[in-house]
Image: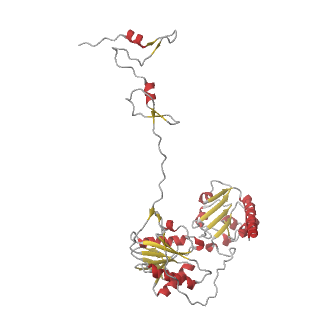
Amino acid sequence: MSRLRRDPRAERAAHCLAGEGPRPRYDRTRRASGSGRPRRDPRAEREAQRIGGAARLRYDLSQISRPVGEAVTAAPRAAPVAEAPKTIIVESPAFLVAVVPDAPGGRLSGHDRQVIGAARALAGREGAVAVIVEGDCEGLGAAGADRMLRLDGAEGYDPAARAARIEAVLASLGARHVLFPESLDGGDLARRVAVGLNEPLFTNAEVVAAKGLVRPAKGRRVEQSLAPPRLATVAPDAVADYAGALREARALPFEGSAPAVATSIVSATRIPADPATVPLSLAEFVVSAGNGLSDLDTFRQVVAALHATPGASRVLCDSGLMPRHTQVGASGTVLAATCYFALGISGAPQHLQGVAGCEHVVAVNTDLHAAMIERAGLAVVMDAQAVMPALLRLLAEEAAGQGKAS
């Protein structure tokens, strides 16, 4: 059996396009009868693989053997939907671990978050953490609270009355453990509650775990450990914050009422200390000057207008422009302030160590790549000498507006 012999001239004549001008033109995609397989057209195959519907050319290489045709139109892709943050809900806890934070100004302090983290270690998977607050308080769910019990804030400050309210709440709550921060207010409240409930108090715990609590004793020469008691206080910077997913912080009603307390206190109010005389280690708001400042008189006006505690970098203290007790850093004073405002400070490693415990850092510097700018939560890349007068004008306008409103 013999196959047909190819006729190149006939195939070429079959490909010729008539009426296309004086010069002959040929269609290579046309298949002549009796000839071999059709000749490939790479351009047409490439066009068939193109995916339309996009500004940038895209091709589907899996369509190699697809016959020549129209371009494939890809289905529009839906934009990815951001998943809502997961909230952990504990419906029926086996027991409760109560926390009584200080919560100054309706905000959890760093120490309060550590106490809630310690409560989470005691609660584990079966228990739940209930936070008892007076007035409104934000960020309880993120801090690790499963329940929240809100008490109406009492007028003035009566330690005995506050302790009586907490005792009434604990009696109705039935918590297995109750934790307080070992602070000026939290430690005093914990001792008053312990006396009122006639229960022992484990103070200054530095290790909190489900197996037991540990604290130093005898000048930190020995350690005392005890199975988790009902009442305990947690030392500052001893337990890590809660770093898990968001918790529910479900509100719990308080059906009882605080008993009347016989006290000889007629009135109790808080007298704020002069921020200019507060030690840096106890200051809540610190404004510091660095080598980028030359007008220290304006700097002192800014400190007074902001009702802050003055601080300084080591360069200014070494030159004698600022007192030595205002030096901030590892070689000076390590801060635990809520807010730190740095003016003209580049941020040496020792200085950054001194502000590592600050919750909020605001920096003003001309160098965009300064270490203090990178550390700051709010940065102003500008000359501090120009920022200070503008800040004083804004504060004066704000004070004038409040005076007219009153």
Q: Is residue 292 left or right of 245 when viewed as pictured?
A: right
Q: Nearer the viewer, residue 212 or 317?
A: 212
The residue drawn where x is 25% and y is 12% is: 2
Q: Is residue 36 left or right of 316 when viewed as pictured?
A: left
Give the vertical position of 123 relative to 69 (above or below): below
Residue 238 visible at all: no
Looking at the figure, which quarter contains the C terminus?
A: bottom right
Q: How is the image coloured?
A: secondary structure
Q: Is residue 343 left or right of 103 when viewed as pictured?
A: right
Marks counted in the figure total 0
- Residue 84, image x and y in percent? 48, 57
The residue drawn where x is 52% and y is 70% is: 113
Give the vertical position of 77 relative to 370 (above or below): above
- Residue 127, image x and y in percent? 41, 72
- Residue 157, image x and y in percent? 61, 81
Looking at the figure, which quarter contains the N terminus?
A: top left
Question: Residue placed farthest to the front in the image?
Answer: 255
Give the vertical position of 364 relative to 198 (above or below): above
Q: Nearer the viewer, residue 221 or 31?
A: 31
Q: Is residue 23 left or right of 9 when viewed as pictured?
A: right
Give residue 9's quadrant in the image. Answer: top left
Residue 9 visible at all: yes
Question: Residue placed farthest to the left in the image?
Answer: 1
